[in-house]
Image (cartoon, rainbow, N blue to C red):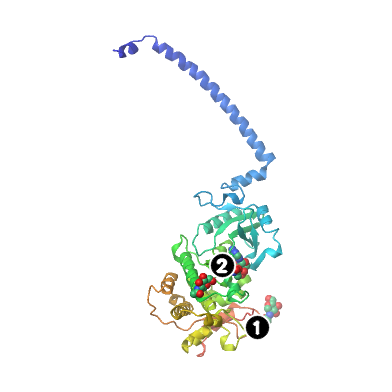
Amino acid sequence: MPRPSFEGDPPMPSVQMETSSKHHSSALLFFLGGAIVLLILLILLLLYWKIIRPSKLMNMVRRPLKQPGPKDLFSGNLRTISYFDFHTLKKATKNFHPSNLLGVGGFGPVYRGKLDDGRLIAVKKLSLEKSQQGESEFLSEVRMITSIQHKNLVRLLGCCSDGPQRLLVYEYMKNRSLELIVYGKSDQFLNWSTRFQIITGIARGLQYLHEDSHFRIVHRDIKASNILLDEKFQPRIGDFGLARFFPEDQAYLSTAFAGTLGYTAPEYAIRGELSEKADIYSFGVLVLEIISCRKNTDLTLPSEMQYLPEYAWKLYERSSIFDLIDPRLQEDGYVERDVLQAIHVALLCLQPHANLRPPMSEIVAMLTFRVEMEVRPIKPAFMDRRRNKRDENFSCDTISVVLSSPQQSDSPSVVHANKVG
Ligand SMILES: Nc1ncnc2c1ncn2[C@@H]1O[C@H](COP(=O)(O)OP(=O)(O)OP(=O)(O)O)[C@@H](O)[C@H]1O
Ligand SMILES: *[C@@H]1O[C@H](CO)[C@@H](O)[C@H](O)[C@H]1NC(C)=O
Ligand SMILES: *[C@@H]1O[C@H](CO)[C@@H](O)[C@H](O)[C@H]1NC(C)=O
Ligand SMILES: CC(=O)N[C@H]1CO[C@H](CO)[C@@H](O)[C@@H]1O
Ligand SMILES: [Mg+2]
């Protein structure tokens, strides 16, 4: 009943025509107004871009993520990296004061710092002069490293670039590095259970880098100073991924090579053959250092003890491997089964042929006694600086000649390097 009254209405069409023409004119006005406003906005933007703040805008374009400042750390669930303002870092480290210098490594100096919110940080100034890496590449590498997270890896909090300068900001590790403990620079004594926890922790961190992360990462520089310890002496591997900032790792190697020679797998040192197995070799050296509390190479010791892998092998052959153990640990006590297992694993890692060294996952399984140890290690290979001391200059040719020449019977798998110190 109510419906027909609407349908039969005659003036409806004309009314509709009128309103639609009104709509047309108002729409035209609206568009015109919009266009004018847009034009004004565009002119303003152009003025802003060209004249007022060219640098600031460029920065905004280049860094679409966040404004600088430590506030946006871990912003929400987004895996964004945070950019630190150079002045924030300058303030935190008291203008990079020498008293805050933690040490200088192959990549540049490291400073301790304290942010306004009380958090402690370690700031690494990269010395990248030799690298032509631009800012965007730097940021993408930092993003990649930040995405690698594990409880046994040091956390990268963020980065900063200030002109040509590049800085990385890490969480500060209260108990510094294993170097201070292993090399006797600190009075800190670690008992066996702590040391074994450190050994398995490093192995887990390396397993993650090699096998379980999205990227297959070879650390290249596993050594005592790169194992950092938190307040509970949980180990965290530092400096992973850093080689990515240096296009030719030669540049990096030349500065750190001598210092890390004792950790370097022979096939990497001589032929530049780099794989996970080079890290596994370094891990083997490190395990022996943690157990014996001495440097891998110590030329002040009696001849047969100078090279840790060589000495460990001699003791192993003589079945007197317990002599290798740190005397303070012998007093304090240790678990025989754990020590034997750790030394056995270390010797497997030090074998001359890379393919004989077990993968990290297997090493973790052995250290946690999830698998039986079946294989016997063969004699380790290591870099030896004993001979040709008069020849001061390090030369790869000399080493490879020595390696491929017929080997002496008394030390079949020793590789001689000529560089001293
Ligand atoms: N996050 C950190 N917390 C506390 N100390 C740190 C941190 N990062 C580095 N250090 C310390 O700073 C010192 C210098 O470190 P750096 O990594 O520059 O040199 P390195 O480890 O000796 O050599 P490399 O350049 O081969 O890593 C080391 O003694 C290290 O223990
Ligand atoms: C070893 O040292 C740690 C901390 O230094 C301590 O918590 C632990 O109880 C010690 N373990 C043994 C067996 O003494
Ligand atoms: C080592 O190299 C430098 C320059 O490269 C040279 O001056 C010096 O004589 C060399 N020393 C030896 C022992 O060959
Ligand atoms: C050598 C060193 O700094 N040791 C410290 C390790 O961390 C514990 C807990 O924070 C401190 O008590 C130690 O002094
Ligand atoms: Mg380091």
Q: Secondary structure at mark 2?
A: strand
Picture coordinates of residue 233, whole percent (x, y): 54, 68
Q: Residues within 10 Å of mark 2 (few under 14, many from 20)?
A: many
The residue lying furthest to the left in this view is 1
2 or 1: mark nearer the eye: 2
Q: Disc 1 marks which amino acid?
A: Asp
- The residue positioned 47% from the left and 84% from the top of the image is 379
Picture coordinates of residue 26, whole percent (x, y): 52, 20
- Based on the displayed image, in which of its 4 quarters is residue 243 positioned? bottom right
- The residue positioned 31% from the left and 13% from the top of the image is 2
Q: Residues within 10 Å of mark 1 (few under 14, many from 20)?
A: few
- The residue positioned 65% from the left and 40% from the top of the image is 49
The residue lying furthest to the top in this view is 10
Ligand 1 has an atom within 8 Å of the beta carbon of the residue at disc 2: yes
Say if 76 sits above or below 52 in the image: below
Picture coordinates of residue 388, whole percent (x, y): 62, 85
Q: Secondary structure at mark 1?
A: loop
Q: CA distance from mark 2 to mark 1?
A: 36 Å
- Based on the displayed image, in which of its 4 quarters is residue 140 positioned? bottom right
Say if 124 sits above or below 420 in the image: above
Q: Disc 2 marks which amino acid?
A: Leu
Q: Where does label 2 land, which residue?
A: 228
Q: Where does label 1 land, which residue?
A: 391
Q: Quadrant of ligand 1?
A: bottom right
Q: Is residue 228 visible?
A: yes
Ligand 3 has an atom within 8 Å of the beta carbon of the residue at disc 1: yes
Does label 2 or label 1 sit earlier along the sequence? 2
- Towards the viewer: 245 or 302: 302
